[in-house]
Amino acid sequence: MKKQIASVSVFHNAKLMAVIYLALSIPLVLIMAIPVLMTEGAGGSLLVMAFMPVLYTIFGFVFTLIGAWVYNQIAARVGGFEFTTSEADRG
């Protein structure tokens, strides 16, 4: 059976992706902080790295918000993503 995604929730999807970006950015920043901490006089770099999860989260929210809005505009005119579903065989 074919189905189409006619519209997506703009704010909800942006909020969800912001949380995912935050969760992904924290471990990355911690890994990137290791060589910075080993370098003498890298206080400025560490400060920038501390703001990276916040910026990553904000940009993830904003761009997902824009992307979901654009998807809804285009899907209303030409149709949304189309996919096929089937009943799962559980047994």
Image (cartoon, rainbow, N blue to C red):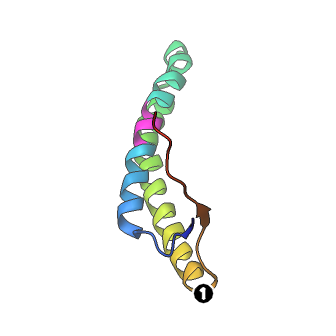
Q: Which residue is mark 1?
A: 77
Image quarter for residue 85? bottom right
Q: Which residues are magenta?
A: 22-26
Q: Residues within 10 Å of mark 1 (few under 14, many from 20)?
A: few
Residue sticking out furthest to the right = 78
Residue sticking out furthest to the bottom = 77
Quadrant occupied by the N terminus: bottom right
- Would residue 2 be found to the left or right of residue 58 on screen? right
Q: Look at the magenta stretch and give its main secondary structure.
A: helix
Q: Amino acid at mark 1?
A: Arg
Please check the rendered image and state whether residue 25 is part of the magenta-colored stretch, yes or no. Answer: yes
Q: Of residues 20 and 41, which is closer to you in this image?
A: 20
Q: For the residue labelled by badge 1, is the local secondary structure a helix, a strand or a loop?
A: helix
Q: Of residues 17 and 8, which is closer to you in this image?
A: 8
Residue 25 percent location from the top left of the image = 47, 37
Residue at 55 percent across and 73 percent down: it is 71
Residue at 47 percent across and 47 percent down: it is 56
Residue 81 percent location from the top left of the image = 60, 68
Residue at 45 percent across and 66 percent down: it is 65
Please check the rendered image and state whether residue 39 is part of the magenta-colored stretch, yes or no. Answer: no
Image quarter for residue 35? top right
